[in-house]
Amino acid sequence: MAKDKKLVDKVYVNDVEADLVADEQFSIENNTGNDLVEDRFKDFEFVNKHTKTLKEFIVNDEINIVDINKLAELNGISFFIPIGWRSLLISLVKELDESGWDREVSCIKEKFAQLRFHADQADEDIIEKYEQLSEITCETCGGKGKIRYDTWNYVACRAHYLENRGLVLVEAGGFRISETYFQWSDVVSMEFEGLDLKEDFHRYLKIKVKNEVQIQCNLAYNPFNIYKESIGYGEFLKQIPGNYRELNYEYINRYYSEAAYCEICGYKAVYNQQCECCEAETWLSYSKGSVYREKVEYLTYAQGNWVKDNGEFYASKQDQYPKNPDHRIL
Ligand SMILES: [Zn+2]
Ligand SMILES: [Zn+2]
């Protein structure tokens, strides 16, 4: 999808080093000729510029991502990781080196929003530690993040998550998901995934479009998913025409027929005690669980989460929802 493309561009291809990383034409055969190796890195400053074998490879506090490129190449592999994970990877290599690793590595990549590093002779505990760290490190900026669910999973801090957050907009005769417009008549079926009526819960909406539409719009997947974390999701559900056999309209009518104002962010975006805008649960929902806080205390806490990092950025981005004029930050 267009959205996938945009995110991938943003995360992976943003500077000359990333291009270097993405260059996959160097195979194992190429690595036997050292001229080629040096040529490829000639415009970069790095510790191992003149290193010719794995044995000579220097690991110290000055190594950078180009050193890691060289390490990969000396191992006969190419690698592809998000920009935000570079310092993690460099720290991993340093720590493995201190533990007496032989510098042999067969795979460095991202999979399912996690850094993967395969090295038979390396300390597994160290690798595991960094794999876990990657799950809480923003792929774009390296800040504190968490795994986000969209058309695919990725790790993002709050600011980058909001920037990349899914958006579904109802328009005349159909709807738009990021840049891609669909007519209602393009859609073959819609169905909730993970629908649990006892828990009033579902994970996402699965949509299948006509095959020719998939080709036309260059969609990687069909069916594809719209996650309930997407902006505009509640409004979208409300306006789906009533002719999709697999869709549970009763569930939509019960929980998505009318949004309520959120006491935390002030926007009209609360469906089923969960705010689509600030993504916090309402006081009512919170107080049903184990209550640690009084209402005012909870609201203050949740509002703190909402405005903490980039208050203005969040507020200015919420033009999808009407705002309660009486709302105030406590
Ligand atoms: Zn970030
Ligand atoms: Zn809210």
Image (tube, rainbow, N blue to C red):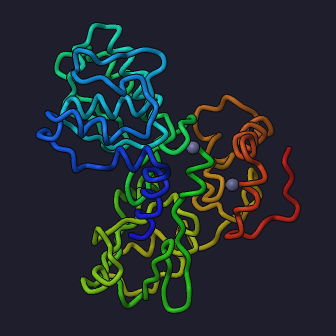
Please name the residue shown 28% across and 84% down the image: 210
Residue 202 visible at all: no
- Front in this rendered view, residue 210 or 268: 210
The residue sitting at the left extreme is 29
Which quadrant holds the C terminus? Answer: top right
Is 299 situated above or below 173?
Answer: above
Please name the residue shown 59% across and 32% down the image: 290
Which quadrant holds the N terminus? Answer: bottom left
**Quadrant of ligand 1 in image:** top right
Please name the residue shown 38% across and 91% down the image: 185
Q: Position of residue 23 (x, y in %)?
A: 30, 49
Q: Quadrant of residue 268?
A: bottom right
Is 128 situated above or below 281?
Answer: above
Q: Quadrant of residue 141?
A: top right
Residue 47 visible at all: yes
Q: Position of residue 232 (x, y in %)?
A: 58, 69
